[in-house]
Image (cartoon, rainbow, N blue to C red):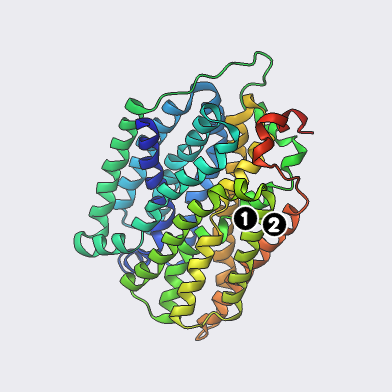
């Protein structure tokens, strides 16, 4: 349990590092001259690095185990990235720092899921993963009002330097406390990167992959990047007001993770719970696209609902995990996480381009109408594709061994 607790702390850091940038937008703009495009690129760099490192993470999990993989990467890349951020003197250094932070956080959740998948019954995977995400989402909460208050009192540079030390110490704790699960080796199993191709050939994963990628994109993209500029441009919000609004959204993400966790066992389906939740996300984001200048109360409620509905990641990953054979657990889950974070990273870059293209001088609402409309369209397409997936009912996974009939 101590090892799981240490992983939980590491995941708090991972969630914090992917979402804190919005709150620091005014300070980074003022002190470093960072533009919306600079910050969009920096946020995208976090997700791009996180996604690309999934291939290394997947092989390392299956070959070296979760303990060494997560401890080394979090301590060196996570701690190093926070250090570079705290010392940054130009926008490009923020981008480098965010890329390092993304690399450091890349193995945290996958290591946790790897341990859960090999140490507990398959039917419990969605609940345990959801609760890990819910606990880790305290990092999203810390990246809102608490960060704004700390940055106001201590200065954002000192806060980031302190986080560099925390990241390094957490890596040491992981080495000391995490235990690798005992796994029976399959002598005929593919090794190395070829295992990713084997996982990608599992056809039952194909209609799930787009929603694996898009379910998280509106929630984390808005919370971690666009909420700050949107609230500042449309409502004249300062850092503290941005922090308060995003705090409610972050709490909704935590709540959503807890709520989604047991729903597959309650309703006996993973597919239709995910469809319902993500359809809700589409509707709320569409509302913001149509009415971007709604009052602050309606905007806050909308952002809360996006956070709540957008917390289905663990459920969809459990759906996909049902079709992976044991020897591909690490690489299969890392491949899915690559699509998840890679899609978010691409969406960060694309939304920056959409916002720039839709900019009309004196009419900031046009920018955010196009931005939210783009999110709604892409998520809607992913939901439609997901409708063609085969359900994986949690109560039958262990008995029917779905992965053995994966093609």
Residue 87 in view, yes or no = no
- In the image: residue 137, left or right of residue 314: left
Residue in front for this viewpoint, 335 or 305: 305
Of the residues under marks 1 and 2, which one precedes in the sequence?
A: 1
Measuring from the top left, give residue 289's x and y in whole percent.
Answer: 59, 75
Above or below — where is 235 with respect to 160? below
The quadrant where residue 236 appears: bottom left
The quadrant where residue 391 appears: top right
Q: Residue 5: which disc?
A: none
- Point 34% across, 41% down: residue: 80
Q: Quadrant of the N terminus?
A: top left
Residue under label 2, please give it.
Answer: 382
Residue under label 1, please give it.
Answer: 214
**Mark 2 surroundings within 10 Å by alpha-carbon count, few (fewer than 14), some (14 through 19), many (20 or more):** many
- In the image: residue 81, left or right of residue 110: left
Residue 80 in view, yes or no = yes
Residue in front for this viewpoint, 110 or 315: 315
- Point 77% across, 30% down: residue: 405
Q: Are marks 1 and 2 in contact (CB under 8 Å)?
A: yes
- In the image: residue 209, left or right of residue 251: right
């Amino acid at each position: 349990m101590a090892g799981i607790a240490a992983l939980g702390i590491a995941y708090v850091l991972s969630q914090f590092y992917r979402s804190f940038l919005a709150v620091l937008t005014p300070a980074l703009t003022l002190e470093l001259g960072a533009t919306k495009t600079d910050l969009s690129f920096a946020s995208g760099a976090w997700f791009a690095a996180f996604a690309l490192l999934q291939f290394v993470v997947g092989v390392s999990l299956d070959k070296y185990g979760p303990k060494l993989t997560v401890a080394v990467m979090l301590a060196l890349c996570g701690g190093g990235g926070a250090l570079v951020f705290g010392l940054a003197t130009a926008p490009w250094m923020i981008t480098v720092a965010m890329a390092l932070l993304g690399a450091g956080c890349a193995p945290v959740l996958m290591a946790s899921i790897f341990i859960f998948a090999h140490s507990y019954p398959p039917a419990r995977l969605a609940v345990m993963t959801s609760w890990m995400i819910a606990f880790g989402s305290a990092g999203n909460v810390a990246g809102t009002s608490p960060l704004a208050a700390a940055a106001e009192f201590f200065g954002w540079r000192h806060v980031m330097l302190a986080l560099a030390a925390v990241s390094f110490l957490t890596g040491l704790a992981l080495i000391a406390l995490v235990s690798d699960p005992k796994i029976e080796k399959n002598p005929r199993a593919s090794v190395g990167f070829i295992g990713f191709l084997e996982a990608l050939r599992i056809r039952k994963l194909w209609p799930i992959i787009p929603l694996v990628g898009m379910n998280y994109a509106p929630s984390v993209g808005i919370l971690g990047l666009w909420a700050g500029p949107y609230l500042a441009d449309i409502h004249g919000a300062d850092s503290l007001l941005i922090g308060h609004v995003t705090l409610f959204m972050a709490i909704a993400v935590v709540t959503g993770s807890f709520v989604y966790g047991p729903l597959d066992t309650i309703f006996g389906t993973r597919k239709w719970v995910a469809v319902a939740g993500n359809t809700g996300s589409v509707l709320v984001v569409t509302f913001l696209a149509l009415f971007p200048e709604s009052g602050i109360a309606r905007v806050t409620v909308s952002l809360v609902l996006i956070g709540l509905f957008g917390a289905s990641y663990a459920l969809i990953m459990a759906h996909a995990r049902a079709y992976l054979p044991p020897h591909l657990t690490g690489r299969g889950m890392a491949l899915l996480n690559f699509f998840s974070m890679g899609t978010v990273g691409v969406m960060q870059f694309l939304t920056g381009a959409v916002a720039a293209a839709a900019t009309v001088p004196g009419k900031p609402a046009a920018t955010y109408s196009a931005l939210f409309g783009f999110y709604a369209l892409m998520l809607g397409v992913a939901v439609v594709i997901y409708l063609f997936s085969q359900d994986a009912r949690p109560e039958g996974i262990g008995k029917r061994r779905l992965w053995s009939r994966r093609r």
